[in-house]
């Protein structure tokens, strides 16, 4: 039997230091699947994109690589990395990573119950919670919940649904503002319809993003952003950046009522 290139990790690591005490009322966000940092120019593009961002949500992020230093020594953002698997040969871990200008009050991660075929790897959901400006940290209703996820792919709809249910379980008891974003692998109509049903049930609204579908994504949009209790000020897709197979998305939000 062929030995797998990957092994399960399912662990969490915190790096860097946050520069602020609270987040909001204006919140600048970056969403990006960084394609395991494989492409030339990734590091310089990344450094430019995260400037002045309050939240950075990465998918296919890596750990135990030459890039670790920039996260470990960061004085602007706290970074929380939830790994789901590692390369047996290189020891490089892959998962989702959330950066924030504020220290997280809480964090939770959950790997998919099922594995993807061939690689036998799982995907990850990472939830983090942050204190908001002009609120007390003890006020649960006024904390911002951020859910960063990379959904399972190349599996049946039933297995995809099970993983998406996991992501939404992380937010069902939160009554304050929510940001749900990531690479959801919604490359067929059935997946997208189920996603929309769950979003509506949680009073989440999808951020309208103007972009060009890509052949490599079967002409479907895989990256999505959903909000509750947050107003959208501006959205920009960085189609000039090619250091990943996904375009970075910058987003400006404002707390509702401010």
Image: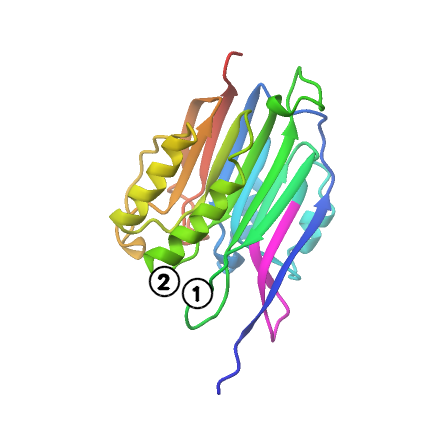
Residue at 63%, 50% (x, y): give it. Answer: 81
230 is higher (above) or lower (below) than 17: above
Q: Residues within 10 Å of mark 2 (few under 14, many from 20)?
A: few
Residue 57 sits in quarter: top right
184 is higher (above) or lower (below) than 235: below
| Front in this rendered view, residue 68 or 60 | 60
| Front in this rendered view, residue 194 or 57 | 194
Residue furthest bottom as drawn: 1
How would you classify the magenta stretch by its main secondary structure?
A: strand
| Magenta-colored stretch includes residue 207 | no
Left or right of 186, for residue 18: right
Percent of width and height locating residue 53: 58, 32
| Front in this rendered view, residue 34 or 51 | 34
Q: Residues within 10 Å of mark 1 (few under 14, many from 20)?
A: some
| Magenta-colored stretch includes residue 86 | yes
Residue at 55%, 33% (x, y): give it. Answer: 173
Percent of width and height locating residue 161: 39, 51
Q: In what element is the residue under mark 2?
A: loop
Residue at label 2? 154
Q: In what element is the residue under mark 1?
A: loop
Residue furthest top as drawn: 257
Residue 170 visible? The answer is yes
Query: Which residues make up the magenta segment?
Result: 80-95
Closer to the chain start, of discs 1 and 2, is 1
Percent of width and height locating residue 210: 31, 34
Percent of width and height locating residue 117: 41, 69
Residue 77 visible? The answer is no
Q: Are marks 1 and 2 in contact (CB under 8 Å)?
A: yes
Residue at label 1? 116
């Amino acid at each position: 039997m062929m030995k797998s290139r990957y092994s399960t990790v399912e662990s969490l690591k915190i790096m860097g230091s946050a520069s602020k005490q609270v987040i909001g009322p204006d919140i600048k966000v970056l969403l990006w699947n960084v394609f395991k940092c494989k492409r030339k120019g990734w590091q310089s593009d990344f450094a430019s994109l995260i400037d002045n961002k309050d939240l950075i949500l990465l998918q296919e992020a890596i750990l135990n690589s030459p890039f670790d230093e920039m996260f470990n020594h960061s004085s602007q953002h706290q970074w929380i990395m939830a790994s789901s698997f590692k390369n047996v040969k290189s020891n490089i871990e892959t998962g989702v990573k959330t950066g924030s200008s504020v220290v997280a009050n809480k964090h939770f991660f959950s790997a998919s119950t099922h594995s993807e075929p061939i690689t036998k790897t799982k995907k990850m959901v990472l939830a983090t919670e942050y204190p908001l400006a002009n609120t007390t940290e003890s006020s649960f209703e006024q904390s911002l919940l951020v859910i960063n996820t990379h959904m399972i792919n190349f599996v049946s709809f039933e297995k995809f649904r099970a993983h998406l249910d996991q992501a939404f379980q992380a937010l069902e008891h939160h009554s304050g503002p929510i940001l749900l974003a990531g690479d959801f692998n919604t490359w067929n109509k059935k997946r997208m319809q189920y996603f929309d049903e769950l979003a509506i049930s949680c009073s989440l609204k999808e951020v309208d993003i103007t972009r060009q579908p890509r052949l490599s994504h079967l002409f479907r949009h895989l990256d999505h952003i959903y909000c509750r209790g947050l107003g959208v000020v501006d959205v920009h897709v960085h189609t000039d950046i090619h250091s990943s197979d996904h375009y970075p998305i910058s987003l400006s939000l404002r707390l509702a009522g401010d």
